[in-house]
């Protein structure tokens, strides 16, 4: 696979993610990605399929199934590919398929994730797991993951550029005892 090809894929994905207000350009870029990828399907690796899926996922009006298919293909090529596993969970979460989302999220190796990605991604994963548990009425399990999220946030000096745990707040509320000893204004 040529570097030019990968560079073009990254360039088009960047436009999709950064120019989301101009849907005409966004969909032109998605069409260009589809045209770029389709003729070379047998040559694509798990990262190529992940990026292709991410291009679909990055467009709010794009059906989630289009991204899911690409993430699933990425995982067929490498079942341990963390970004595809994480985003497949997000696709299920977006469709309110809580059990399926939870299944994907729980397959993500958090230690491996910690070694390769920013800490906010681990925090967000814990929030999403907690949110899914909350939605299926397993509140104790949800709280365990929300506590991990808060601990990560506190360990990182309550950084206000960290994630904003909107899903957790939606579940437990702003006045929950879990949040009583932290500066909540930095978190929301």
Image (cartoon, rainbow, N blue to C red):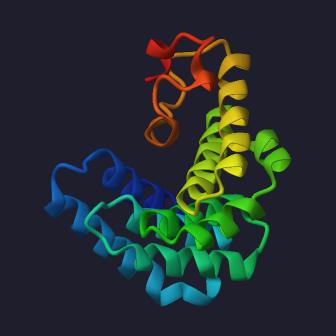
Q: Residue furthest right?
A: 111
Q: Nearer the viewer, residue 75 or 41?
A: 75
Q: Quadrant of residue 123?
A: top right
Q: Position of 143 compared to 11: left or right?
A: right
User: What residue sits 58% from the left and 21% below the top?
Assistant: 179
User: How far from the left and from the top, in percent, is residue 49?
Assistant: 57, 73
> Looking at the image, which residue is at 72% across and 25% down?
151
Residue at screen point 25% across, 48% down: 19
Q: Is residue 76 above or below residue 92?
A: below
Rendering quarter of residue 38: bottom left
User: Picture coordinates of residue 40 (x, y %)?
Assistant: 53, 86
> Looking at the image, is 185 positioned above or below residue 53?
above
The vertical placement of 22 against 187, above or below, is below
Q: Is residue 44 visible?
A: no
In this picture, residue 89 sits left or right of residue 109: left
Q: Quadrant of the N terminus?
A: bottom right
* Camera sees residue 180: yes
**Most foreground residue, 180 or 58:** 180
Rendered location of residue 14, percent (x, y): 39, 50
Residue at position x 71%, y 47% from top?
140
The quarter of the rendered structure image containing the C terminus is top left
Q: Position of residue 168 (x, y in %)?
A: 52, 39
């Amino acid at each position: 696979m040529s570097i030019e090809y990968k560079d073009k894929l990254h360039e088009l994905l960047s436009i999709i993610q950064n120019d989301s207000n101009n849907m005409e350009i966004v969909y032109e870029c998605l069409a260009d990605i589809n045209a770029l990828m389709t003729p070379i399907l047998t040559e694509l690796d798990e990262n190529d399929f992940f990026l292709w899926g991410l291009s679909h996922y990055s467009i709010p009006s794009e059906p989630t199934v289009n991204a899911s298919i690409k993430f699933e293909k990425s995982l067929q090529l490498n079942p341990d590919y963390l970004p595809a596993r994480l985003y497949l969970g997000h696709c299920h979460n977006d469709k309110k398929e809580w059990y399926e989302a939870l299944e994907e999220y729980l397959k993500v190796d958090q230690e491996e994730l910690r070694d390769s990605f920013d800490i906010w991604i681990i925090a967000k994963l814990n929030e999403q797991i907690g949110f899914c548990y909350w939605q299926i009425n397993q509140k104790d399990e949800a709280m365990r993951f929300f506590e991990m999220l808060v601990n990560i946030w506190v360990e990182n000096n309550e950084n206000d550029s960290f994630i904003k745990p909107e899903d957790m707040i939606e579940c437990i509320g702003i006045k929950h005892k879990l949040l009583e000893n932290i500066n909540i204004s930095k978190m929301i």
